[in-house]
Image (cartoon, coloured by chain):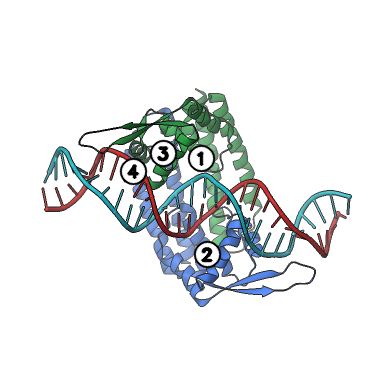
Chain colours: A green, B blue, C red, D cyan
DNA sequence: TTCGCCATGTAACTAGTTACATGATTCC
DNA sequence: GGAATCATGTAACTAGTTACATGGCGAA
């Protein structure tokens, strides 16, 4: 959410539409979730709220990142090791909000973990046909990710 | 959890180890989560609990699926459209607990949704380099999944 | 007149996390 | 003596869901 909010002053409604048209494949909150988090960003000092009265339209709450908020996105982007693949993709998507070197380090770390993952998969002797099938998917997925990581690395280093 | 419990009478501890060595890549609950859910299975009539006293070891609670529990796994496997790829993999992993035809239908449905997904991805004109990168990953992932689905289909039809 | 857009929220729930808490046994 | 294994749970939290609730405006 901080990443989306970094684009400018936005309402919850704006953010929701924006999420659907951009990061939906990596992260897509329910409306109620989004509206629940916004006040918490304000409480945490990461965003400021402004009430805008409108004629012939419902009033809106506009949210805008504070300096602390911008710092928080950057800290997340540069420092936290992504727990899932989608989290890594999100970081690439918001890469402009952090230092290039830090992002490249994240990609390299993730690639290293994928190589370890592959070794783990290769050591498994599946007990059933069904287990063999799901394992097979893992064995095919990892190289696809590694290829993409290598290309993303090159593109981001440009 | 019902899928794991279908293997026989197990303690929470057993299930946790089993999950780690089998479905961990698709689903891996925290210990506390697992222990929280087990009593709810009993409340819902899907499992029965049995207290086993042990000398020189802590006592254990053993859980065993009821007929309703076995029916519930089957219903999940055969009927609920998987919301995520991992859920689909889980269903393949537990395929022996449901009818072959129903599982094949799930694979076909998912494949169809992936083809639609691909069309959606192909229609997107990314606004930034970063957006182009993450989109590219989606464009590469879908065919990998479709290939695997086709092969899984063949193997399961055997 | 009906549908989609604009706009915000609450309530009740499930799913999941980390940290806290305990304690014997067995193997190195 | 120390680590791993067996064994279960609570507390406090974050993340996320579906359903409920409201209402005006503009376009087909």
| Tag in front: 1 or 4 | 1
- The answer to whether dots 1 and 2 both sit on one chain is no
Picture quarter with the N terminus of chain A: top left
Cβ–Cβ under 8 Å for marks 1 and 2: no
Instruction: Using the numbered discs, state the Cα–Cα distance from disc 4 to disc 3 in whole angstroms.
Output: 14 Å
Q: Which mark is residue B120?
A: 4
- The answer to whether dots 1 and 4 both sit on one chain is no
Q: Residue at x 44, y 65 (%)?
A: B103
Element carrying mark 4? helix
Residue A100 in the image, given as x and y percentages of width and height: 53, 24
- The answer to whether dots 4 and 2 both sit on one chain is yes
Chain under disc 2: B
Q: Residue at x 64, y 43 (%)?
A: A116
Instruction: Using the numbered discs, state the Cα–Cα distance from disc 3 to disc 1 in whole angstroms.
Output: 10 Å
Outermost residue to the bottom: B67
Q: Residue at x 79, y 72 (%)?
A: B55
Q: Which residue is mark 3?
A: A23
Q: Which residue is mark 2?
A: B94
Cβ–Cβ under 8 Å for marks 3 and 1: no
Instruction: Using the numbered discs, state the Cα–Cα distance from disc 1 to disc 4 in whole angstroms.
Output: 21 Å
């Amino acid at each position: 959410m901080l990443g989306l909010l970094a684009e400018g002053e936005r309402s919850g409604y704006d953010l929701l539409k924006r999420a659907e048209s951009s990061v939906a494949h990596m992260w897509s909150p329910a409306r109620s979730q989004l509206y629940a988090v916004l006040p918490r960003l304000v409480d945490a000092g990461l965003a400021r709220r402004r009430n805008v009265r409108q004629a012939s339209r419902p009033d809106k709450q506009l949210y805008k990142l504070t300096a602390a908020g911008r710092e928080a996105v950057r800290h997340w982007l540069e420092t936290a090791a992504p727990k899932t693949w989608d989290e890594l993709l999100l970081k690439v998507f918001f890469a402009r909000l952090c230092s290039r070197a830090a992002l490249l380090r994240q990609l390299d770390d993730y690639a290293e973990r994928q190589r370890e993952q592959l070794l783990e998969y290769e050591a498994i002797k599946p007990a059933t046909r069904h287990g063999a099938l799901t394992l097979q998917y893992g064995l095919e997925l990892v190289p696809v990710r590694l290829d993409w990581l290598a290309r993303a690395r090159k593109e981001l280093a440009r």
